[in-house]
C-alpha cells in the first residue's frame, strides 16, 4: 500500500493570485477523502500577512479532523506555527528545511543551525503535550536535488542535514525536489545515501515537482528504493501562472493511474478522483491545471486488466 | 550510447490538417542531424492520396542521404512501399504490424497472416538487391500494449507475432505503444517476454507515446531492460489537434534531458535541439507542441554537474 499525500490545498494553491474560498477548500478535501485519499496537507501555519491564502488553515484542520480515517497534515516553518498546528489538532507537522542555506535564509530567514534548533524546540514542545496529542514531526529537506539560487547541492549536505535533523528530534525526514531538478539517478543515489545514514525507516517520503517532465519517473524510482509515501497535487496544482509550462507538483490522478496500471495499491478510486478534478476546475477556473489521464481517459478494458503481482512484477 | 530515432517528420506530422512544406522538412532534418541526432524517420511510402503529408518522402530520403553519418529510415506498410524506399536509398525500412488484428485490418487492410507474408516478400525483394543496397527491415509491432478497438492485447499475441516476423525475415522487431496504453510494468514484462522468445539482439527499440503522461517512465523502463533505441519526436509532435491533452510521441528534448541528467550518452546537444524546436515552432505555428524542459530550462549548473557512472549509477 502506497500512501499518496495530497498537498494541493497547501502547496497547490499558495502561489495563486486569488484567494480560494474556505467552502471550496472544504468540499475539495472532503471529496478527495471520499475518493480514498488517506492523507491531506490542508494548509500551513505561517505569517498570514505574507501568505494570505493560508489564513484559514486552523479552520481547515478542524474540518478535516471530522473526516474518519483521514491523516491531517499541516506545514509549519517554526515553533510558533507548530504550536498553532498542535493546538488545532493536526496529526502531522511538516517542516521545510532547505538544503540550500541561501534558500533557507531567503525563505524562512534562518540558517541550517537555526533550523536544527527550531526542530529541537518543536520536539520539546510536542513532547510536553499529553500523550494523545503528540503529533508526528516530519522534516522535508527542501532543494534536496538542487537550488535555483545556489545551483548544485552536494549529496553530503543532504545527508549531514538528515542526520542532524533526526538527532534534533524529527520523527522522520523526507526529500523535496522544490525546484524540479531531480532525475531518476539522483533520486536513487540520494535516497539510498539518506537511508544508509539515518535508517530506511526514517525516510519514507518524497515531494516531487514535474517542472521538467520527470515527476512520475522520479516517483517510480523513489518507490523502487522502498519509499512508501508520495506527495502529489490534484491537477498538478502548484505551477506558477506566470511561467508557461512551469508545471507544479506531480499530478495526483496521473500518479494513481500509473500505480493502478502497475498493480500497486493506493486505495484511491481513480474515476472518483477525476470527478473531484472536474469539480475543482469548475470551482477555480483561473487556476492552471495539468496532467494527462483526465483528458485522455483510461485505456479500454483498464478495470478488467489482469494486474501484475506488485512484488514480482509478473502476471498471474 | 543510446540511439534516439527522431520520428517527427513521419509520425509527428502525418495527422496535421495542413501540409508542411518540403523546405521546412529539409531544414528540420538538417538541423536535428547537426544537433547530433543520428537516426531520423523522414517519412513513409504509403498511398499519398490517403496521406498527402507524405507525398515528398522520396525527395526527403534523397536529401537526408546527403547528410554524413545520418541513418535514414522510412515507414513502409507493404512490398510496394518497400520497393519505393529501397529505390530511394533508405537505410532502414520500418514496417508496422499491428498486434490487434482488428486494427491491422482497418489500418492496412491486412490480417496477421497477410502481414507476415508481406514481410517475407519484402525480405525476398531486399535480398535480391546488390549487397550494398540491402536495407535493414525493422518490424514495429503496433498496439503492442493494447488497442483502442480491441482493448487488452494478450502478451502471447505479441510474442507469437515477434517469432513469426523474425522467421519471415525481419532484421529485428520492436514494440510500439501506438495507443499510449503502456505502463512500466507492462513494458518490462513484454520486452522480457519478447527477448526470451527471439533473443535480446533481435529487439532493440520501442516506440512510445505520452498520451497518459507515462512516456518517459516507460522509456526508462525499456532502457533498463537493455534496449538501446528509442523513438521520439521533437516537441512531442504527433498529438491529435482535436483532442486536448492527447499528447503525441515522447518528446525528444525531454528525453535527451532525462538521459543527459542521468549520465546516459546520446550524442545529442540539448541546447542545440531546443533551438531546432524554436525554429520548428516558428515554421509550423499551427502544430501543437508539448514538453517541459524547453519552457522550464535546464537546472542551474546543469552542464557542470558531476554525472553518475551510467553503469553503476553512482557518482565518482
Image (tube, coloured by chain):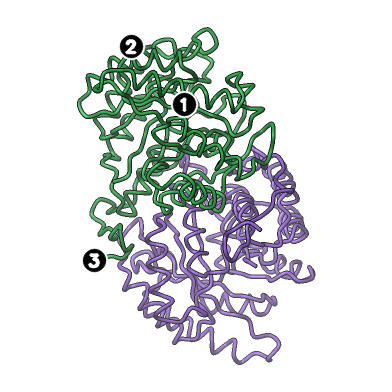
Chain colours: A purple, B green
User: What is the chain letter for disc 2?
Assistant: B
Mark 2 residue crowding within 10 angstroms, few (<14) / some (14–19) / many (20+): some
The picture quadrant where one finds residue B273 is top left
Q: Is residue A184 left or right of residue B118?
A: left
Which residue is rendered at x = 54% and y = 76% of the image?
A138
Which comes sooner in the sequence, label 2 or label 3?
2
Q: Are marks 2 and 1 in contact (CB under 8 Å)?
A: no
Residue nearest the viewer, comparing B311 with A243: B311
Quote the CA–CA distance across marks 2 and 3: 48 Å
On the image, which quarter does residue A110 sit in? bottom left
> Dot 3 falls on which chain?
B
Residue A187: % across, % down: 42, 62
Q: Earlier in the sequence, mark 2 or mark 1?
A: 2
- Which mark is nearer the camera, 2 or 1? 1
Residue A191 on image: x %, y %: 43, 69
Q: Pointer 2: what residue? A: B59
Marks 3/1 same chain? yes
Say the numbered circle drawn on residue B106. Answer: none
Disc 2 vs disc 3: which is toward the camera? Answer: 2
Q: Is residue A288 visible?
A: no
Q: Quadrant of residue B91?
A: top left
For residue B95, the mark is 1
Label 3 to label 1: alpha-carbon separation:
43 Å
Secondary structure of residue under mark 2: helix
Asked whether B288 or B62 is in front, the reply is: B62
Residue at 52%, 39% (x, y): give it. B210
| Label 1 SS | strand
The furthest residue to the top: B49
Q: Chain of mark 1?
A: B
Query: For mark 3, what is the residue?
Result: B316
Name the residue rendered at 41%, 70% in the picture.
Answer: A109
Residue B150 in the image, given as x and y percentages of width and height: 69, 34
Amino acid at each position: 500500500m502506497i500512501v499518496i499525500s495530497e498537498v494541493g490545498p497547501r502547496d497547490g494553491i499558495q502561489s495563486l493570485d486569488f484567494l480560494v474560498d474556505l467552502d471550496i477548500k472544504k468540499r475539495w478535501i472532503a471529496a478527495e477523502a471520499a475518493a480514498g485519499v488517506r492523507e491531506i496537507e490542508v494548509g500551513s501555519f505561517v505569517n498570514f500577512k505574507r501568505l494570505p491564502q493560508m489564513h484559514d488553515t486552523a479552520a481547515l484542520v478542524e474540518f478535516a479532523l471530522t473526516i474518519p480515517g483521514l491523516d491531517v497534515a499541516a506545514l509549519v516553518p517554526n515553533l510558533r506555527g507548530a504550536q498553532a498546528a498542535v493546538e488545532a489538532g493536526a496529526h502531522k507537522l511538516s517542516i521545510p528545511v532547505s538544503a540550500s542555506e541561501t534558500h533557507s535564509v531567503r525563505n524562512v530567514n534562518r540558517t541550517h543551525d537555526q533550523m536544527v534548533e527550531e526542530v529541537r524546540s518543536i520536539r520539546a514542545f510536542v513532547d510536553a503535550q499529553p500523550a494523545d496529542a503528540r503529533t508526528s514531526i516530519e522534516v522535508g529537506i527542501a532543494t534536496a536535488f538542487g537550488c535555483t539560487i545556489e545551483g548544485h547541492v552536494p549529496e553530503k549536505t543532504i545527508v549531514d542535514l538528515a542526520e542532524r535533523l533526526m538527532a534534533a528530534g524529527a520523527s522522520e525526514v523526507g526529500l523535496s525536489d522544490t525546484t524540479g531538478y531531480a532525475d531518476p539517478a539522483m533520486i536513487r543515489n540520494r535516497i539510498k545515501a539518506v537511508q544508509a545514514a539515518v535508517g530506511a525507516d526514517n525516510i519514507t517520503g518524497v515531494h516531487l515537482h514535474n517542472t521538467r517532465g520527470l515527476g512520475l519517473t522520479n516517483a517510480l524510482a523513489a518507490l523502487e528504493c522502498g519509499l512508501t509515501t508520495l506527495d502529489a497535487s490534484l491537477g498538478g496544482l502548484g505551477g506558477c501562472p506566470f511561467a508557461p509550462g512551469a508545471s507544479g507538483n506531480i499530478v495526483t490522478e496521473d500518479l494513481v493511474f500509473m500505480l493502478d496500471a502497475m498493480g500497486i495499491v493506493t486505495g484511491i478510486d481513480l474515476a472518483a478522483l477525476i470527478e473531484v478534478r472536474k469539480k475543482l476546475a469548475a470551482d477555480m477556473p483561473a487556476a492552471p491545471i495539468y496532467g494527462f489521464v483526465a483528458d485522455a481517459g483510461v485505456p479500454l478494458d483498464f478495470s478488467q486488466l489482469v494486474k501484475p503481482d506488485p512484488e514480482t512484477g509478473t502476471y498471474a
